[in-house]
Image (tube, grey):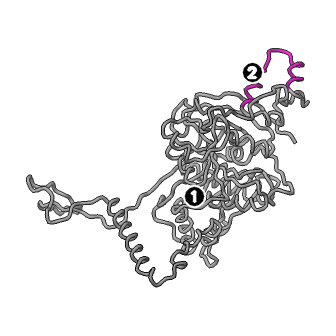
Amino acid sequence: MYSIIEYKGLKSGYRCGYCGCGDGKVSFGMWSHALTVQDYQDLIDRGWRRSGKYIYKPIMNQTCCPQYTIRCDSTNFQPSKPQKKILKKMSKYLCKGELPKSPSDGELMDSLCEDAGSCDAPATCRSEVSVSVEGPVETVKSAGPEKKTGREQTAPPKPGLGADPSRPPCRKAKEVRKERKLQKELQKQSGREAGSASIPQTEAARPPPPSKTIEELIAESLPADAVYKLEVRLVPVCFDDPEFTATYSQSAALYAKYQTAIHKDSPSECSESQFRRFLCDSPLEPENPSDGPDCGYGSFHQQYCLNGKIIAVGVIDILPACVSSVYLYYDPDYSGMCLGVYSALRELAFTRQLHEKAPRLRYYYMGFYIHSCPKMRYKGQYRPSDLLCPETYVWVPIERCLPKLDLTRYSRFNETPEAVDVSRVKELGKVLVLHKRTVMPYLLYARKRTGPSDEETVLQYAGLVGQQCAERMLLYRA
C-alpha cells in the first residue's frame, strides 16, 4: 500500500485566524490522495497536520503565529485540580440534571480546534478563565451622607478626613487567601505535632494515599443511578459503516449549529458539503494489524450521546504511536459543561486504553501549541507534554521550551548546537514518484523527463517530509 501525494508548494500571505493578521500566515501544503497511518505518523512528527485531505506545514520562522506540534504522554498523565473539577461538574449534571449557571465557570478551553476549511483561515478557539475570590468582599462607606436612589452611591470623603481610623485598612483578596492558607497549614502542623507523641513513628510517617487515575475519576463522574446517561461511541469515518451513516445527518446538523453559534460562521461556511470535506473526507487508509488496537487504525468520530442524543463529537485519528485530535464540535446549549476539557480527558483515557493492547501507542497529540496566542496556551496544561523542535524534529519537555518562547515567538528547542535533522535529504535519486501510473525512483524519472527540470521542487518536498517518507510515499508527477 502506497501513500500518494501531490505537492502544492508554498502558500503565503493569507489570513491568520489566531492573531487576525490579514496576510501573515505562511505554510507549505500538499494534497493526499491516499495516506498510510505510518506515513502520517511520521509526517506529524515533522510538524505536518491535516485538514480533510489537505496536509500543511507552517513555515515556523516566517509565519506570524508559529505553531508547535504538542503531545502529551498519556501513560504518565495526572489530571490537575481544575481538570478534576470539570469531571465533578459532569457528575453533578448527570445526577441532578442541572446545567451550571455560569457557562465558563472553571473552563480552560472550549474545543481542540485547528485550521478549518481548506486551511485558509483556522477556526478560532475560545478559551475563558473565570476567577473566583474567596471570602467576603468588604465595602467601605464614605463619611458623607447617602442618597437613596435605588443604586448605592459612594460619595468622596470630605477634605481632610481621609480613611476611617476606627476601621481596619482594606486588604487585597489575594493577601487574605494567602493568610488563611498559612493559618490552615500551621493548624495542621500543630495538630500533627500534638498527636505524634501517641502515634507510632511508622504510622506518623505513612505516605499519603496515591492519586486517583484518570480512569477512576471518569468512572466516578458516571454514577449508575444518574438521571442522565452519557455514552461515548467510537464510529469509524466510513460511509459503508451503518452506524456512521445512521448518525451522519444528526452529526452534520450539530456541526452547523456549533460553527454558527461559537465561531459565527455563515450558513454557507458550515454547509453539509463543508462538513463532509473537512471532517469526513480522510486520506487515511484503515488498517487492522494483529498487534494493533481492537478498533484498528484510521479516522474516527467519538460521539458523546446524552440519553441517545449526540451533544458532542470528537474527530480523532488513531495512529501507530498516538491518538491525534483533529477537531471537536458540540451543542452550544451545553457550553456550561466545559465539553472541550471533558472530551480531552476522555481522549487521554482512551489513549491509555489503546496502549494496553498496542504498547507503542502512548501519546495524545493535541495539534499545535501557539504560545503567541494566549487562547491557544491551554494545551500546555496537560502534563507531561513535549514540543517538537522545528529544526531537528526531536521532542523537548515543554518546561524547557516555555522560557524561550517567552522571549521570542520562534525558537529552536534542541539545545545541542551541532544537532541536525537526522532525516534530512541524503539521496534525492531514491525519492519515489508516480508518473503515468508507473512507480519509479526520481533518478529514473529525471532521465525520462522532457522539459525544464523540477529537481528544485522535488528537493524541497523531500526535505520537508524527510528521507524515509520520501522513499515510501509516491510523489505524483504529471
Where residue 407 appears, as percent x and y from the top left, is 48, 37
Rendered image: mark on residue 308: none
Can you say whether 123 is above or below 258 in the image? Answer: above
Where residue 24 appears, as percent x and y from the top left, is 55, 31
Q: Earlier in the sequence, mark 2 or mark 1?
A: 1
Where residue 348 appears, as percent x and y from the top left, is 65, 58
Specify the segment rendered in magenta: 442-463
Quadrant of the image containing the C terminus = top right
**Residue toward you, 413 or 438:** 413
Q: CA distance from mark 2 to mark 1?
A: 44 Å
Can you say whether 383 is above or below 437 in the image? Answer: below
- Residue pictured at 86% horizontal, 16% vertical: 450
**Residue toward you, 178 or 195:** 195
- Residue pictured at 51% horizontal, 58% vertical: 107
Residue 301: quarter of image: bottom right
Residue highlighted by disc 2 = 456
Residue highlighted by disc 1 = 341
Neighbourhood count class around disc 2 (C-alpha, 10 Å): few under 14, some 14–19, many 20 upward: few
Where residue 164 appears, as percent x and y from the top left, is 14, 61
Q: How many discs mark residues in the rendered view?
A: 2
What SS does tag 1 mark? helix
